[in-house]
Image: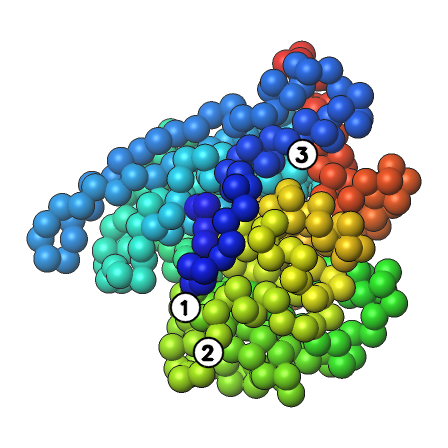
Amino acid sequence: MAQQSDDSSREKTGENLDVLVSTQTVIKKALDKLGYPEQVFELLKEPLRVMHVRIPIRMDDGTVKVFTGYRAQHNDAVGPTKGGVRFHPDVTESEVKALSIWMSLKAGIVDLPYGGGKGGIICDPRQMSFRELERLSRGYVRAISQIVGPTKDIPAPDVFTNSQIMAWMMDEYSRIREFDSPGFITGKPLVLGGSRGRETATAKGVTLMVREAAKKCGIALKGARVIVQGFGNAGSFLAKFMNDSGAKVIGISDAYGALHNDEGLDIDYLLDRRDSFGTVTNLFKETISNQELLELDCDILVPAAVENQITAANAHKIKAKIVVEAANGPTTLDATRILSEREVLLVPDVLASAGGVTVSYFEWVQNNQGYYWSEEEVEAKLEEIMVKSFENVYRTSQTRRVDMRLAAYMVGVRKMAEASRFRGWV
Ligand SMILES: NC(=O)C1=CN([C@@H]2O[C@H](COP(=O)(O)OP(=O)(O)OC[C@H]3O[C@@H](n4cnc5c(N)ncnc54)[C@H](O)[C@@H]3O)[C@@H](O)[C@H]2O)C=CC1
Ligand SMILES: O=C(O)CCC(=O)C(=O)O
């Protein structure tokens, strides 16, 4: 999704907003810095496999609609591929490819035994009924069933998909295989083998990254003014955790607009009132645009919605001292450079949002063991991994004198490059 949010007045800068191209640019730089030959880039610049499927679904009114979907598997040298499935009208093949590469990098940074995968269906679930969504979820699994599975490629939730959709997908896969297969997918409801702590894991991980970044910048979290773009799984729990830690959440948004109050928003009220698609601004008369939100004065800014929100057009107007990317791809490469020149500490997506896949890994391990952990155990393990990964990336950025995004790519790409080399692929 070369996403633009609700403000059509954004300046045009001629910047390339193709997230696959920008990801490839940073992968190339990371491999060059690490001294890998060109053939490694040739291997890693695109997914090994991309499946394009067309899914005919009987709609509630009796008509048949054919949906287009994708599953991309970037690199499986380290282990099975893993990553979410998004349901969104702006999904493209190029975006799904980039998202699968980011999953490989996340797995490398937090050191999971996976490569990256990602899926998407072009649809608007906000316009579909519960039963239509069930048929689409099951149809997608039937279409990709040959290339996925607990030891091949393990899906999970992403934008506009949730634990109910994971449950239908798991059930469909179990029917096809004639075997109960909880390890086929993560982000499931607890009663179907989900992990404690998975629902809040992405936000918990981002909270830890905000904490570590604030320490580096000498900013006290208590009283810090925080803005969160997006109020879905990642954004809404993050706003709550920030609030709980004594920070003041002064702005939030969804796809339709944003809310701002310098005295702090009532996050518990908003959490209670948001719908299952993370929409809450429709309840208010006075809203501002997503672009206005991003440019407000604050200490910490967390984009937690979609791609290409901070670009060359607005990077110089960002007032935050710390930007932590909960969303995948919210900041373009030009914007990354501008923020870095302005000495804004940017914690990149492939590190900041890796808490989700980390607890998904815990879920898969628990499914394989048939033994389930307490929430405290999950959170302690998550904290250890995220803090260690932050330090690793931060140290790399300091010692190699590169920005945090390039440092994260250097850390993330190494394991799959080495595994591919040992396998004799490059
Ligand atoms: N759910 C997870 O475990 C993980 C999610 N992420 C990333 O976090 C971001 C958000 O994902 P979730 O919270 O899971 O999705 P979600 O579907 O729960 O919520 C998405 C939020 O973004 C808003 N939104 C959608 N389109 C928008 C637009 N054009 N402009 C502004 N806001 C818009 C929606 O209204 C909603 O509030 C995505 O980039 C996703 O890839 C990253 C790692 C894990
Ligand atoms: O939980 C997972 O396996 C994947 C999460 C995801 O899609 C992401 O980190 O972007």
Q: Which comes sooner in the sequence, label 3 or label 2?
A: 3
The span from disc 1 to disc 3 (Cα, nearest Å) is 32 Å
Residue 407: image location, x then y, percent: 77, 40
Residue 215 in view of the camera: yes
Which quadrant of the figure has residue 384?
A: bottom right
Check disc 1 and report its element: helix, strand or loop.
loop
- Horizontal and vertical percent for residue 183? 50, 44
Callout 2: helix, strand or loop? loop
For the residues labelled 2 and 1, the Cα–Cα distance comes to: 9 Å
Q: Amino acid at mark 3?
A: Val
The residue indicated by pointer 3 is 26
Q: Is mark 1 within 8 Å of ligand 1?
A: yes
**Which label number is shown at residue 287?**
2
In the rendered structure, the answer to whether residue 222 lies left or right of residue 4 reads right
Q: Considering only order in the chain, which callout, 1 or 2, is on the residue closer to the N terminus?
A: 1
Residue where numbered disc 1 is placed: 256
